Amino acid sequence: MSEGESTMLFKTYAPGSDADLPRPIYALLGVVAGGFGFWASVITLRYFEHGAQALEADEAARALALAAAWMFVASEMAGFGMAAFLPVRKMWAQRWKLFSLAGAVLVLEVCTIVVVQMSITKGADMSQQAATTRAQDLRAQIAKIEANAAQLRANAENQTKQAEAAKSAWARVLAASEAGAAARDAARLDESTAALYAELGKTESDKRPTIIGMIGEGYALAYVVARGVLVSVAGLVFFGVAGAMWRAVFTGEAPSMGRSTGKRSPWWQLLKPKTRAQASAPAQPEQPAQPEPQPQPEQQPKQQPKQQPKQPEEPTTEEMLSHMQIPIPKPCPVCQSTRRANIEHRAFKLSDGSAKHLMSLVCDDCRHNPDYGHDISLKPQDLPDTEHGALLEAITRWNASTPAAPAAPAAPTPAPAQPLLKLNPPKTKRTMQRRTSASVGAKVDTGTGPLDGYRYRRVRAAVKAGKLRPSIRAIQAAEGGSADTVRGYIAEMIREGVITETPDGRSWQLRPTDEPVNPTA
């Protein structure tokens, strides 16, 4: 299996292999799913009907319960089908209402199925127990009758022997009559046992094994309840799938777990035979290896007119500074980097509507340094109204804070028709640089030096401006940092004379301007 491909067992897959099916196929799948859902609904209704007949004694109550069962099952299946058919985003409220209704009906249906299954299981077990008890009673009756018949036959034999041994005729006649009566009673009892034997045989043949008798009462109830609930849930799932399939047929949107994957072409276009180029196009969704470039000389002349004309190049920094007769500054004054010492041009609109430009003479990594940022950044309202006053003032203020560099050779002054300084440069897409901080060893922006004290300088500027109270909790809430780091900031501001301790010695405050600074503090 190449890279970018996978099977259905994995979560990732190749986009080209997940192609949409023709609309007739979706329609056929919708019909099949709807048929299975209707089948499950009929079985669920039979459960309701059996429960109504078993639990309701009144005929009117039984009919009302059956009508309610029809309504519940129909609303449940239709709710899931319509919810799957409706748009996901536009009609999400109606979808959730239908899902909620179907879920409530499903809960009621589950409760009804549980009661019905319990009654069915209990009834079957009770009937089998009654049959077993009846068989035992029949056996006892038969045994008792057979014992009586045997006793009568024994009495008849004794009477016959007495008649034979009697000397008088009257005694012989009396003994013979008693023996005949006993024999007739025994024969009558034998005839009655034949009917009991027939009933016992029928009772034994009607006995069937029950679920409770095989796996126990608890497991039997769990099994029958799970079977009924599974039938009901199967109907919901099939009706939901049917709604999604018919939505794909009518709207042309492929169903994808409730989300649309976009419009597709009509189904009659999908049935048209594809050309060789079209058939081979979607076979390569991702190229694991870069193919070798194939020469296409006939397409090269066609691509040349499509190229956009090149924009006129803007003058470089050296040309701009030479044009204004300003010495070329050194690289970034913070990190002394010559590789990334870029000059940023910023346009501001003045009160008269004209555009002015301001240059930031620091690199991208050090642009957020507060010490240099306040010196080189000017707000629009602070810009003078002169033509080049913004640039001159910014560079002058920057040169005042850094040593001057040797002057560069002046470039020839361009013609007035093509000025080098453009007040309205073309708008280009600019990529915002993520702010980074320098690190010294294992510390990152936790010191007070030039490379690891960016946060300290922000805290010091805020304390000087009166925007931040000089306390550990206030500084941590504003800039973060550990307690030890903030204590180092406070100690450094005390040494620099920015703050001083309060008279009670419990906190710090801004040092008054007339109070002398103790350099040994």
Image (tube, grey):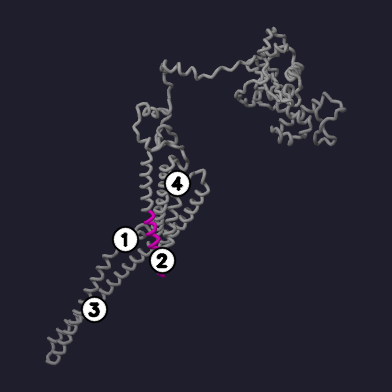
Q: Are marks 4 and 2 in contact (CB under 8 Å)?
A: no
Label 4 vs 1, first from the N-terminus: 4
Q: Can residue 470 be seen by looking at this rendering?
A: no
Q: Which residue is mark 3?
A: 148
Q: Which residue is mark 2?
A: 63
Alpha-carbon neighbours of circle 4 within 10 Å: few (<14), some, or many (≥20)?
many
Whether residue 392 sits left or right of residue 196 in the image: it is right
Report the amino acid beneath label 2.
Ala
Sequence-wise, which precedes: disc 1 or disc 2? 2
Return the residue at label 1.
Answer: 209
Q: Nearer the viewer, mark 4 or mark 1?
A: 4
Q: Secondary structure at mark 1?
A: loop
The reply to whether the C-beta atoms of the residues labelled 2 and 3 are less than 8 Å apart is: no
Three-letter residue code for mark 4: Phe
- Asked if labels 1 and 4 touch by Cβ distance under 8 angstroms, the answer is no
- Tag 2: Cα neighbours inside 10 Å, few (<14), some, or many (≥20)? some
Rendering coords of residue 478 (x, y %): 71, 34
Residue at x 49%, y 18% (from the top left corner): 305
Q: Indicate the position of residue 180 as horizontal and vertical percent values.
A: 16, 84
> Which of marks 3 and 2 precedes in the sequence?
2
Examine the rendered structure and indicate whether residue 427 appears above or below residue 17.
above
Mark found first going from the N terminus, 4 or 2? 2
Secondary structure, mark 3, is: helix
- Residue receiving disc 4: 85
Please report whichever mark, 4 or 3, sits nearer to the chain's N-terminal start. Answer: 4
